[in-house]
Image: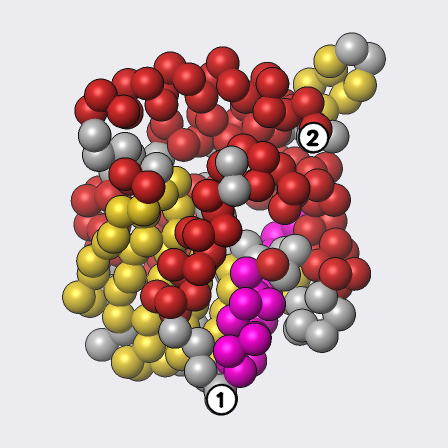
Amino acid sequence: MWKTDGVFETRATLAKRRSDVAQMFDGVAQRYDLMNDVMTFGLQRQWRRDTVEAVDPRPGQLVLDLAGGTGTSAATFAARGAEVFPTDLSLGMLRVGREREPGLQFVAGDALQLPYADDTFDTVTISYGLRNVEDTLGALTEMRRVTKPGGQVVICEFSRVTNPAFGLVYEQWLPRAIPLLTRFSSNPAAYEYLFESILAWPSQAELAELMEQAGWKAVGYRNLSHGIVALHRGWKA
């Protein structure tokens, strides 16, 4: 808990304790989608479209949208006819999601102890949430447990910029830009954690290796916006 100008701000640390992460996202839930647009200059809309195409949701399929609290991503899958279960650790995010997307089935759940039976979902997907789980390998293993044989995982996450010159500019620009961009946020300290967690996150190849360690097969990835974000996909044999 950080105090700035007399206001207490909650943020997680790179230890990513569940209680800290949940409390931090509770505090930013109301403006979370707005801040995603602001922080990415609207690029996240294209990234979401790319994620939908990778998931390829179809009528009759069951989709787990992990860390999907506000329902923004889940709504795009449901629009294609899939039955979607947005699941999140943050009750504040779920509260906002239920208000905005009352037709979706929101579930409170921990990525390390999912409240679902083995072999349930055709697709498990998570956008910008995996790096907030304190045990990445454990989460990937748990996601595989609840996926049907022949099903897939699709992960959209901030990653490593592939162009060295652009990457240097990006890493120098981001910490300077965050104080300006977060003036719209109710909890600017949370976005300091965002920057730290992006820099500490594994590279595309390292995440692919973790997915293979968790038992996913035919793992591959695709860079978006020069690697600012990457889509990873794997299959359950």
Structural crowding at the residue carrying mark 1, measured as other residues with C-alpha within 10 Å and reported as few (<14), some (14–19) or many (≥20): few
- Magenta region: 73-90
Q: Quadrant of residue 164?
A: top left
Residue located farthest toward the top when viewing the structure as drawn: 5
Pointer 2: what residue?
A: 185
Locate residue 200 relative to residue 38 in the image: left or right.
left
**The residue tagged with tag 2: helix, strand or loop?**
loop
Name the disc covering residue 208, or none: none
Q: Amino acid at mark 1?
A: Gly
In the image, is residue 180 above or below residue 114?
above
**Nearer to me, 57 or 189:** 57
Residue 169: in sight, yes or no?
yes
Left or right relative to 212: residue 142: right
Image location of residue 146, percent across then percent down: 43, 73
Q: Position of residue 10 (x, y in %)?
A: 68, 28
Circle 2 residues within 10 Å: few <14, some 14–19, many ≥20: some
Q: Residue type at mark 2?
A: Ser
**Residue pointed to by mark 1:** 60
